[in-house]
Image (cartoon, rainbow, N blue to C red):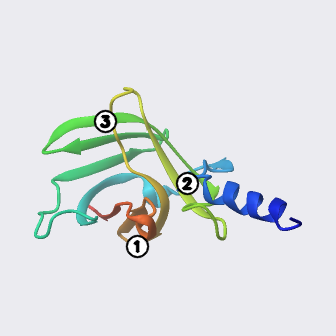
Amino acid sequence: MHYLPFALALLAAGASGCQRAATQAQAPSATLVGTWKLTAYQCHCPPNQPVPNESVTFEPGQRFKLYRNQALAAEGTYTTGEGVSCGGGASEPIITLTPTAEDAYAPHGAYTLQGNTLVIDQCSAADGPKYTYTKL
């Protein structure tokens, strides 16, 4: 019975979800500002699915606009910070895009930014999508 508190704590940690909110807002990197085209999309989708026609523009005032098929699909604010994604592990850079409209969707999650490549990983280890963008 002395294992019960440990087991409950472990269960609660596992049920905490795939991503926690960023622990602190940070000013976005100047290199994030600009327009990015989706060039790769990793998901658990039917085979041979084309990469969606999508781009996102990050503006200096921490605003974004997301386009799908050249039409505005979402706009709002974005923040970057440090947090834990996928229910555990070390703290890592997190990006959160918050659309103004309640029914709009925008990617969010752990991100890496290397040169002209931005990857937003929504917990691909647990079947979430992973978006790779190239700066235009």
Is label 3 or label 1 in front?
A: 3
The residue depicted at 62 percent of the width and 52 percent of the height is 16
Residues packed near mark 2 inside 10 Å, few (<14), some (14 to 19) or many (20 plus):
some
**Residue 60: x and y, percent?**
46, 44
Of the image marks 2 and 3, the number of the one nearer the N terminus: 2
Residue 53, horizontal then vertical, whole percent: 15, 53
**How far is mark 3 from mark 1, CA to CA?**
25 Å
Q: Quadrant of residue 105?
A: top left
Q: Residue at x 22, y 35 (%)?
A: 72
Name the amino acid, label 2.
Gln
Between the residue at mark 2 and the residue at mark 1, the CA separation in whole angstroms equals 25 Å
- Residue 46 location, x and y as percent? 15, 64
Label annotation for residue 115: 1
Count of numbered circles in the view: 3
Q: Which residue is mark 3?
A: 74
Amino acid type of the residue tagged 3 in the rendering? Ala
The N terminus - image quarter: bottom right
Mark 1 Cα within 10 Å, few/some/many (few <14, many 20+)?
few
Q: Nearer the viewer, residue 129 or 54?
A: 129
- Picture quarter with the C terminus: bottom left
Residue with the most extreme front position: 1
Q: Which residue is nearer to you in this view: 6 or 136? A: 6
User: Please, what is the three-letter code of the amino acid marked with disc 1?
Assistant: Gly
The disc placed on residue 19 is 2
Q: Secondary structure at mark 1?
A: loop
How far apart are the two marked residues, 2 and 3, measured between alpha carbons? 21 Å
- Which is closer to the viewer, label 2 or label 3? 2
- Nearer the observer, disc 2 or disc 1? 2
